[in-house]
Amino acid sequence: MSGGERSVVGRRALTYAVLLCLAGAALALWAATRSWSVELTVRPAPLPPVRDTRSGASLLPWLPALALVTLAGGGAVLATRGRLRRVLGALLGVLGLAVAAGGGYGLVA
């Protein structure tokens, strides 16, 4: 593989990584605004039950902020090079794990 081919493959991989990062962050931000749990409180007849809906953002207040930081990080990857890009990529990986952990918590909560 020549240097030119390696450059094209590297740019393509970077493009895919940034697009997946942005898509994941956007999906997490969207999911945080959806209803994650509904609690019904029974009241005496003839009153209907009280329905309390909680979104992901109310259950995990840090999740939308983390998703926004990840969105910004996707753009920052494009603005950096070399070692700083690698460090930023590792940080985005950790943020992705934290977002996934929040989603996992939402499944069991």
Image (tube, helix red, strand yellow):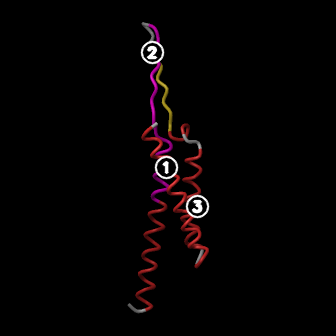
Observer-side mark, 1 or 3, equals 1
Examine the rendered structure and indicate whether residue 38 appears above or below residue 11: above
Q: Position of residue 60 (x, y in %)?
A: 55, 41
Q: Position of residue 52 (x, y in %)?
A: 49, 26
Residue 72: mark:
3
Q: CA distance from mark 1 to mark 3?
A: 20 Å
Q: CA distance from mark 2 to mark 1?
A: 32 Å
Observer-side mark, 2 or 1, equals 1
Q: Position of residue 49 (x, y in %)?
A: 44, 17
Q: CA distance from mark 2 to mark 3?
A: 44 Å
Q: Residue furthest left?
A: 1
Residues at marks 2 and 3 touching, judged by CB atoms closer than 8 Å: no
Residue 85: mark:
none
Amino acid type, mark 2 = Val
Q: Residue furthest top?
A: 45
Residue at (57% x, 54% y) in the render: 68
Q: Using the image as rendered, state which of residue 90 and residue 50 is in the foreground.
A: 90
Amino acid type, mark 1 = Ala
Q: Is residue 90 magenta?
A: no
Amino acid type, mark 3 = Ala
> Which residue is tagged 2?
42
Q: Position of residue 76 (x, y in %)?
A: 59, 68
The quarter of the displayed image where residue 46 is located: top left
Alpha-carbon neighbours of circle 3 within 10 Å: few (<14), some, or many (≥20)? some
What is the span of residues highlighted in magenta in the rendered image?
A: 23-44
Examine the rendered structure and indicate whether residue 11 appears above or below residue 25: below
Circle 2: element type:
loop
Q: Is tag 1's residue or tag 3's residue first in the polypeptide sequence?
A: 3
Observer-side mark, 2 or 3, equals 2
> Which residue is tagged 1?
101
Circle 1: element type:
helix
